[in-house]
Image (tube, rainbow, N blue to C red):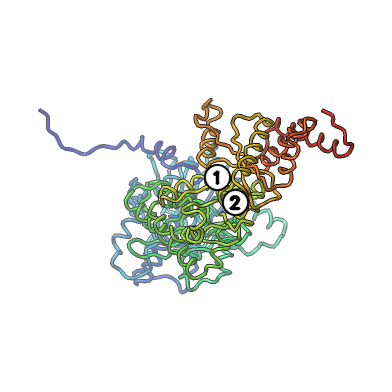
Amino acid sequence: MIQEKGSISVHTENIFPIIKKWLYSDKDIFLRELVSNGCDAIMKLKRLSAIGEAKVEENPKYEIRVILDKNKKTIQVIDNGIGMTADEVKKYINQVAFSSAQEFIEKYKDKAGEENQIIGHFGLGFYSAFMVADKVEIDTLSYQEGAEAVQWISEGGTEYELKPSKRTQRGTTVTLHISDDSREFLDSYKLRDIINKYCYFLPVEIYFEDANEKEEKIKKGEKLEEPKPLNDTNPLWLKAPNQCTEEEYKEFYRKVFNDFREPLFWIHLNVDYPFRLKGILYFPKLKNQFDTLEGQIKLYCNQVFVADNIKEVIPEFLMLLKGTIDCPELPLNVSRSFLQNDKYVQKISDHISKKVADKLTSLFKTERENYNKYWDDISPFIKFGCMKDNKFYERVKDIIIYKTTNDEYVTLKDYLERNKDKHENEVFYVNDEKQQAQYIKMFKENGLEAVYLDDMIDNHFMSFIELKQSPVRFKRVDADISKSLKDNTAKIDDKEDNKIRKTLEDIFKDSLNKDDVKIQVESLKASEIPAIILLSEDSRRMEEIVSRFGNMGINNPFPKEQTLIINKNNDLVKALLELKDDKEKENDIKLICQHIYDLAMLSHRPMEPEEMTDFIKRSNKILLRLATGEKKE
């Protein structure tokens, strides 16, 4: 039996193709990595200067410059940071995956100074340069006294050349000789966009220069503009919430998201324990329901952009918001594109969810009027959050409100309490205000109220609440509400009343000839309405479920349970009773019954094309009879 111990060997000639093609998901990340390295070099020098281990000029202006020279096919990234000695170049550049940043953090972790803002961790970012360049040069001069400038050159393989450099100022210049298959990066607009995307909030000023454009201006004798940094070195999320003004929050929102509609409100996250996290989440004002698909939360790590909408960090329902979150301790993978430590990330996600719930609860309790104003815009976020995150639901269940047909905003508890004598544990709702206008009118006239549930998410949300708060039951305003609409003050002899009901039922059954429609005669308070259509909530929901699978050939196994309620208090219905024995009026009776049914149906749902065609024909026929007195069939 063989037993052996040893070291796994790595063939460097195989490493570079992997780094070049597969390490990073997008080629443009090379610029993020090189600019981040320059930022690290400056932050290291600032740290050493703060603790007295490095001498720098008084009030130094730290900066990173990105210079494009399309004619030479080069991109340079220049910093005036810590620089490197020849030995450090051999140590940090020639040894793949040896992180100078990690070593620096470990060495000075107990020293006083600035908060840790070092970005690098893996010692691989520099090699992203080879994704776009077939030759890379480093010119660097260390901050250390007596250090000599050195130049490192490599043409994408494992061979390199190290020799003296002509650089005279402290810092590092990385020069990329762009390969032919990456010429799209020799475009000033593209480079600016990449810097804006990934490096807009880096803590060191970044300047961009188009060398060819500058040369042309000099030739023409044009005045060169004073360069301005591309980035904002002090993003608003780094400030304490009590130091930020309302206008600053709004301006930051406009700048980052190019949205000139003011946000409704915002949540400023400022956490130091058990992890460091800062950020601002905005609740945007929606133009329509489909806006809820347009959320954007930008995730940063030490002010370097990582990605939009990383679902592991941002609870899924908050993806509907807009905001920025910076977490220096994110457990990112090598390419800084994906997360690794699920438990740690889950803690971050839970904390963000809790902070949002706390903010909403605070608004509900202290700014109820504003909370009501915001509700139509924020309700999709909250409802989606409740269904996706049970902890979030438990935190906000008592501050979920509903707009009523009386233009009030009430909690579910309030609604049930004030309507318990009329319909206990039932919540009547409207999902199409225009289509259901007649039902809303009847509700108001009868002292009843319903709530508006007309968002795309509400069908699912109602089922969710019924499950969570049983025996609560949601019913649409055209469900079985005839008991609530009856005129109980009418005093009619039972025998006579039953006779009238039976007569009307027979008239409509014979005229309509619809076996799937139940006919019911009632005395309704709204005497101007001849009839209404009611559909049981269960039947309606089943119809909706089946309609989603309509193209799969699935049929509704349950009866429709559609009921036509005839209002015997209505004058037109009373007139039908007087015509019932007139043989010459049979066609008129049939026409009127069909028209009453159509009018009731129009208030219930949109008509099918064939139904609408028949309705228009009958309407024209009725108008012609009114105008001429003729009885044309």
Mark 2–mark 1 distance (CA, rounded to whole Å): 10 Å
Indicate left or right for 402 with 91 as reference.
right
Residue located at (80% from left, 30% from top): 584
**Label 1: element kind:** loop
Residue located at (77% from left, 30% from top): 583
The answer to whether residue 168 shows anywhere in this view is no
Which label's residue is closer to the chain start, 2 or 1? 1
Depth check: give the residue in front, 617 or 265: 617
* Residue type, mark 1 in image: Asp
| Residue 360 percent location from the top left of the image | 47, 63
| Image depth: mark 2 or mark 1 in front | 2
Indicate left or right for 572 with 400 as reference.
right
**Label 2: element kind:** helix
Question: Residue under circle 1?
Answer: 480
Question: Residue under circle 2?
Answer: 485
- Residue 460 sits above or below residue 210 on the image: above
| Residue 554 percent location from the top left of the image | 51, 27
| Residue 201 percent location from the top left of the image | 50, 60
Depth check: give the residue in front, 414 or 632: 632
Check residue 399 in the rendering and tell me which mark sits there, or answer none.
Answer: none
Q: What is the quadrant of the N terminus in the image? A: top left
